[in-house]
Image (cartoon, rainbow, N blue to C red):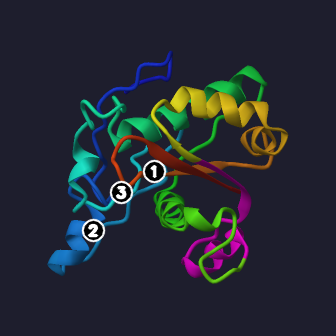
Amino acid sequence: MWPYPGRVCPVRTFAPGHRNGGGYARQRASGQEPQETPRTSPSDELPAASIPAEDPQSERKAEGNGCAYTLEEFAAAHFAEINRIREEHGLSLLESDPILIEMAQERIGEYRWGHKRADGSQWYTIFGEYDSDLRAAGENWISSGNDPYSQMEAFIRSEGHSANILNQDAVYVGIGVQWNDEKTAISVVQLFAK
């Protein structure tokens, strides 16, 4: 287990049932009944971004094109930085939830509309589309970058984004990540829930 000590994020292994790492998407595609993945606490392994398993770029770094991270490492760095910042401010660490990660991954697919959904509705309406007791607590979205730490610095400099990160009511965070068209940078959605 990695206890979030610094800015180094390890190559991620996945819990059974996550959509990548042999879990949910492959089980669903093969007709197997998906296994439920329990919520993890900040002291558990870092959460996996719910990246479609068929995306070959999610399994390796985009070497030579400006981004030294895999999608999983990028998401893990955001998760660790959120909790490092919260800890510095005396707040509880956020947990991961596989359904919230799936929601965040869906939201990153809608990023061209900003904080709106493809149908024009508000970002938080996604919570009504999933069988979950999670309630919306905030959403941060940032366009393509190749350094998760500079993205987090930008969030902290923004009053609204930092308010979401430091929201005392938040209990969970899901990180959605997506390559830009050129596979040179990664966009991120942080979805907070209570």
Q: Where on the picture, by quarter, is residue 88? A: top right
Residue at disc 3, secondary structure: loop
Q: In screen coordinates, is 78 left or right of 71?
A: right
Task: Give percent across and percent down for residue 151.
Answer: 59, 34
Spatial CA distance of label 2 from label 1 is: 16 Å
Q: Tell me the tag on residue 177.
A: 1
Q: Report crowding for label 1: few under 14, some 14 to 19, many 20 or more residues within 10 A (C-alpha).
A: many
Tag 3: residue type?
Answer: Ile
Tag 2: residue type?
Answer: Ala
Spatial CA distance of label 3 from label 2 is: 9 Å
| Residue shown at 84% from the left, 39% from the top | 159
First in sequence: mark 2 or mark 1?
A: 2
Asked whether 84 or 61 is in front, the reply is 61
Residue at disc 2, secondary structure: helix
Are the two marked residues, 1 and 3, in contact with CB atoms closer than 8 angstroms?
A: yes
Q: Where on the picture, by quarter, is residue 61? A: top left
Residue at the disc numbered 3 = 51
Task: Give percent across and percent down for residue 157.
Answer: 77, 30
Residues rendered magenta in the picture: 122-142
| Residue shown at 27% from the left, 38% from the top | 62
| Residue shown at 75% from the left, 43% from the top | 161
Q: Tell me the tag on residue 48.
A: none
Tag 1: residue type?
Answer: Val
Q: Where on the picture, by quarter, is residue 138? A: bottom right
Q: Tell me the tag on residue 25.
A: 2
Query: Mark 2 against mark 1, which lies toward the viewer?
Result: 1
Q: Is residue 46 visible?
A: no
Task: Give percent across and percent down for residue 48.
Answer: 39, 47
Residue at disc 1, secondary structure: strand
